Image (spheres, rainbow, N blue to C red):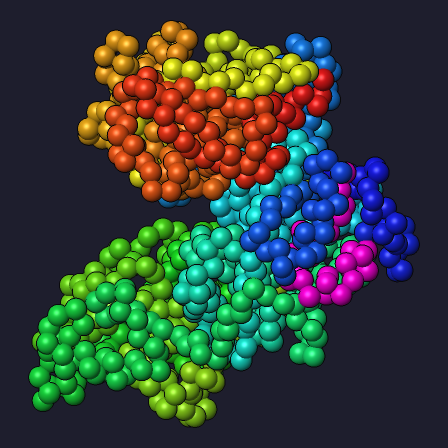
Amino acid sequence: MDPPRTGSPYQPAIEALESHPEKKFYNVSKLGGAKYDTLPYSIRVLFESSVRNCDGFLVKETDAMNILDWKTKQNCVEVPFCPARVVLQDFTGIPAMVDFAAMREAVRNAGGDPVKVNPACPTDLTVDHSLQIDFSKWPETVLKNQEMEFGRNRERLQFFKWSSKVFENISIIPPETGTAHQVNLEFLSRVVFDMKNFLHPDSVVGTDSHTTMVNGLGILGWGVGGIETEAVMLGMPLTLTLPEVVGCQLTGTVSPFATSIDIVLSITKHLRQADVAGKFVEFFGSGVSQLSIADRTTIANMCPEYGAILSFFPVDNVTLKHLKHAGFDKAKLEVTEAYLKAVKLFRNDESSSREPEYSQVVQVSLSSIVPYVSGPKRSQDRVAVNNMKSDFQACLNEKSGVKGFQIAAEKQNDVVPVQYEGNEYKLSHGCVVIAAVISCTNNCNPSVMLAAGLLAKKAVEAGLVVKPYIRTSLSPGSGMVTHYLSSSGVLPYLSKLGFEVVGYGCSTCVGNTAPLPEAIRNAIKQGDIVACGVLSGTKTFEGCLCDCVRANYLASPPLVVAYAIAGTVHIDFDTEPLGTGSNGRSIYLRDIWPTRQELHTVEEECVISSMFKELKEKMEKGNKRWNLLEAPESTLFPWDLKSTYIRCPSFFDKLAKEAAPPQAVENAHVLLFLGDSVTTDHISPAGSIARSSAAAKYLTSKGLTPREFNSYGARRGNDAVMTRGTFANIKLLNKFIGKPAPKTVHFPSGQTLDVFEAAELYQKEGIPVIILAGKKYGLGSSRDWAAKGPFLLGVKAVLAESYEKVHRSQLIGIGIAPLQFRPGENPSTLGLTGREQFSILFPPDLSPRMTLDIKTSTGKVFSVIALFENSMEITLYKNGGSLNFVARRFL
């Protein structure tokens, strides 16, 4: 997708940057005029892509005009989108690259040049996104698991190494670097692409649901299915309904005590209530500048929680500051800023600047977001921190139950003196005896852990201490957390308050805490004191930390430190001091709570720059085992017929210069008769390989023992395993069987067989098969093998009441016809048993949503809707799917 495309009608719109005249770009701002100025920023990215990629065939001039007319065309038209790049993770990357290798083979066999078969769109593939756990005992865990992964997946890694050598336009991220979405965010993101001195916005589609994180950097991106991704890699545009864009206006000022987690969860709640499913969300308003990049990417990453396609934060000064610390040099930053401002993709912080128009606006007042804790017995019982004292008092009064402790009124002010380490202390209801800072839920956003460290620093400097009988601990979720606490200089202050690093793993949260001092235990029991534990983990229930600790609260890391210093939860932070400082002055929480600006500064200058420096060094140095791994450099992959991991699939066996017209489906049997809400988990091979499955029988025939089966995910490069694992889910409910089982009936013989075995018999007999299903067929994560598997089983069409949109597209992309019952009709109303044979005729002039007639062997005729949404989908189907369609372009 090297811009500009030859013959584009928009060539006159190419201009140069004033500050860098060698840099060219499409000035879509001038081209779009007044209409462009009202477009949401995310739609402006779609418009730029359509202008730059306009070739009159895949992307037409009318497509660009439809996007420009977004205000009136939203939800009404389908538009193409050519993302700037693709991100693959290992489990979806392996079948994609196997398909590319198979395509080279097929192009060679059809008389073409296999060297031409390369990704047209820049593609990054992260090798070790998924990790199978063999060892869970720290500290040897990491190295042992990595060694096991490298050993069992050697064939897969060698194939990736071959791919990195022979394919152009693809970058393989070696093992032990990180997960796809994190590497995408920290290393792969460009923000502005510079292709041979031609500039355009960065955008991405990926095969991972967390791809949406990059929208926090002003990069348009979301997750799609594997087949769609492969088509994009080959230069095909994605087709999407021009979406509604919900503007989320952030106003007000964040409470100084509200953490990033409070903000993220509150905004997520608002968006879930606003019904943004299937829409773009875009943030604007004065409050946006108060959110750090970590906040933004976390909010964008929560898209699955509220159902939006993506949540877009336009690039602004906060983004530029982050990019500087992330390693962008001065020249690159200058070009990035100048370009984005020239095409009006840069968000102005000034309140006077004109905001885009949106489909609807959701307002969120940041001032209304207050910090919460959860407890004292259940994590779902949230308490605003400013109500904590009164709520705890109410808990003392209430009858024993989900919140109450039923303490008699005359005993609620009891105080029990206790001697500990030569000093006398007084325990009362609400006293804190356990305080644990745990980062398991806070790894992706360092600000809350940093807040705890900065608060500890200010507390120590003010002369505050934590009573020595309180069991304090610091359990980071990973070494990276310790790294940034250390690099920011706050770790020693946490230690001085007793929060020492105790290790990396679940600790206090699951009851793994050191015993309380015996004197303290005795005093609590003697006085029937309701003692408290405060932790920043995920679980709280009575007695979970210690049998004598009856109240347990979940709180953010800085609040854990604050309550430890106060020594009680029975406190109003607004009116009561935490303690007395070294100068004899009362110190309140507001005196030591770090400001958001302090947090952002430390986060960017210490944490972000350090993390990016470390990642860059890791990427440049590479992985020793990966570097030493040998792989062939031949144009065609030397398939090993004995391999059980990598196998040449049959998708391109019939590749020819001209596509054969769609064949009528005659006398097809029903392979499966399914009900409502059949998910891709039911269809696609996933997880471990059951010993009694068809896939297990195949692997056993190859000489493997059950211990060597590995998982379906690891074997996604072997179509023989994956086809046998299709519809192999033990929870599959096939109406022919009447109970959950991966079985079906082979009607010519009457045998009940594994789904694969029945399909294999049908294929040997030359009998096509179809699938009958109910509503919402193909729900869940979009998986390429949920379409590829049925195709290789011989499925010609699926007839369902309704489809999950992405899965419907995947079926078309592989060459399976998605047919839909007419409204109000289904197998039951039509009197279908599934035991009939079905004949379907596809006319040469097939058109979107055309009505087709289906004839059954019982003489019944009924009509269905051919669920093609546009002419491009019909073109792809007539060409045997998107992969065959693109493969022909290499001949």
Residue drawn at point x = 36 percent, y = 51 percent: 505
Q: Position of residue 610 (x, y in %)?
A: 61, 56
Let me know if residue 53 is in the magenta part: yes
Split into 4 quadrants, where in the image is the N terminus? top right
The kind of secondary structure the magenta stretch mainly shows is helix
Let me know if residue 523 is in the magenta part: no
Residue drawn at point x = 32 percent, y = 20 percent: 859
Residue 505 can be seen in this image: yes
Residue furthest top in the image: 765
Q: Is 6 displayed left or right of 505 in the figure?
A: right
Residue drawn at point x = 38 percent, y = 42 percent: 823
Q: Identify the magenta region.
A: 27-55
Q: Position of residue 781 (x, y in %)?
A: 43, 41
Residue 165 can be seen in this image: no
Q: Is 65 displayed left or right of 101 in the figure?
A: right
Name the residue nearer the viewer: 410 or 252: 252
Q: Position of residue 842 (x, y in %)?
A: 51, 23
Split into 4 quadrants, where in the image is the C terminus? top right
Residue drawn at point x = 26 percent, y = 69 percent: 381
Name the residue nearer the viewer: 565 or 87: 87
Q: Quadrant of residue 730?
A: top left
Name the residue nearer the viewer: 295 or 570: 295
Q: Position of residue 889 (x, y in %)?
A: 70, 23
Q: Quadrant of residue 879?
A: top right
Label count reads: 0
Figure check: 283 above or below 728: below
